[in-house]
Amino acid sequence: MLRKVIKPLAPYFERRKAMFKFREIHPFILSALILICGCSGPKNQVVVYTSLDQVYSEPILKDFELQTGIKVKTVYDVEATKTTGLVNRLLAETSRPQADVFWNSEVARTILLKNKGVLQPYFSPSASGIPSKFKDKEGFWAGFAARSRVLIYNKNLLKETDLPKSIFELTDQKWNGKFAMAYPLFGTTSTHAAAIFAELGYEQALVFFGQLKANGCLIVDGNSTAKDRVEAGEIPLAFTDSDDAEVSINSGKPTGIIYPDQEAGEIGTLFIPNTVCLIKNAPHPDNGRKLIDYLLSEEVEGKLAFMDGRQIPLRDGVKRPLTTPTYSEIKTMGVSFEEIALKIERASSVLKEIFIR
C-alpha cells in the first residue's frame, strides 16, 4: 500500500534531488543569473520629476530613451501648483529618495532644494558653454532653455500705441480691472514676485503688489489660464511666460508679446531657465547623470526652441526660429538667482495675505 502511494511521487523527489544537487554544484552560476536578472529590470531606468509642461518634456525624454535604451519613469505636476508640489515631495522623500533627477521649469526652488541638502553636485560636461549666471558654482544645478516673464495682450482690444512698456504702469488707473496674473505663490509667477522683492526691496515691493491688488488685478490659477483669458477677449492684458504667449501666437490667436522694462533705467525682463539637478542618494545616480548630460546638450536646447513654446537657448550657437530673440537681445533683470531664492519664501508669505482667495 505504501509503495502505491510513494511510486507516483518518485518523479517529484527526483526533480527536488536534482535541484538541490544543482545548487550545491553551481552556486556561482546561480549568483550570476540572479545578478543578470536584476540588471535587466529596475536598474536600467531613471526616475525624473519635472514641472515643465508634459507636451514639451515628454518628447525630449522619449528621445533620451531611444538614444540610450534607459527607461525613463516620469512624475509630472499640475499647472496650479507647478514646481511647489514636486519640491514638497522631494523634501518629504529626503530620507528615502525616489527620484534621480529634478527637471524644474524654474530656478528659485531648485536653489531652495540645494540649501536644504536635497541635491548632490554634478559638473556635467554638457554645461560647458552655458553662461556662468545660469550655473551653480558648486555644481548643484545648471540651467538651460529659458523663458521670460512677459505681458501678453489682445490685439483686438489694444492698439500698439496703448501698450504699457513697464509692469509698473499697471498701477495706473487706466488699467483698473484690465489685467490678470497667476496666483503668485506657485511656479514662475512666485519666482517673478521674489525677483521684484529682491530688485526693489521689501517695502517698495510691498507697495507695488498692494497697488496691483487695489487696481483690480484678476488672480487666476496659472499662466496658461491668464493667457486663455486674454485670447478670449475677457481682459486685454496679462502677466504670463513667453512660452504660453508663443503658443497663443503660433496657434493664430490675436495676441502679442511685450518684453517689459527694456528702456534705460528700467529693471529689465526676468529670464527664467529650466534647471536640472541630481538628487542626493538617488537610486540610479549613473543613469541620472546621463540624463542630465542629455538635457543640458545643445541638441535639447534646439528642440525646445523649435517647439510651440519657443524656449530661448542660452548659447548663441544653438539654432532657433528667426522670431525667437537671443538671450543677449533682451535686457534682463540684474538680480541673481540666489538673491531671488532668498526672497521667495518671505515674498510668498506676504503675497498670500495680499491676494488671499
Image (spheres, rainbow, N blue to C red):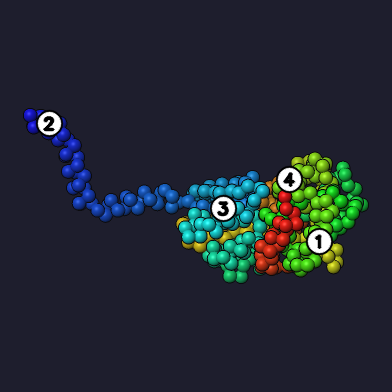
Q: Are marks 2 and 4 in contact (CB under 8 Å)?
A: no
Of discs 1 and 4, which sits in the foreground? Answer: 1
Lower position in the chain sequence, tag 2 or tag 4: 2
- Which quadrant is home to the N terminus? top left
Please tell me which residue lies in front, 128 or 79.
79
Q: Secondary structure at mark 3?
A: strand
Q: Which amino acid, by three-letter code, is at mark 4?
A: Thr
Return the residue at label 3. 49
Left/right placement of residue 338 relative to residue 69 reads: right
Residue 225 tag number = 4
Residue 271, position in %: x, y? Answer: 72, 60
Q: CA distance from mark 1 to mark 2?
A: 92 Å
Few, some or many residues within 10 Å of mark 4 (<14, 14–19, 20+): many
Of discs 1 and 3, which sits in the foreground? Answer: 1
Q: CA distance from mark 2 to mark 4?
A: 76 Å
Identify which residue is drawn at 60% across, 46% down: 58
Lower position in the chain sequence, tag 1 or tag 4: 1
Residue 236, position in %: x, y? Answer: 84, 46
Q: Are marks 2 and 3 in contact (CB under 8 Å)?
A: no
- Residue 248 lies in quadrant: top right
Q: Which amino acid, by three-letter code, is at mark 2?
A: Val
Identify which residue is drawn at 19% across, 42% down: 16
Name above or below for residue 207 compared with residue 177: below
Residue 114, position in %: x, y? Answer: 58, 65
Lower position in the chain sequence, tag 1 or tag 3: 3
Return the residue at label 1. 208
Q: CA distance from mark 4 to mark 3?
A: 23 Å
Q: CA distance from mark 1 to mark 3?
A: 34 Å
Name above or below for residue 115 compared with residue 66: below
Residue 5 tag number = 2
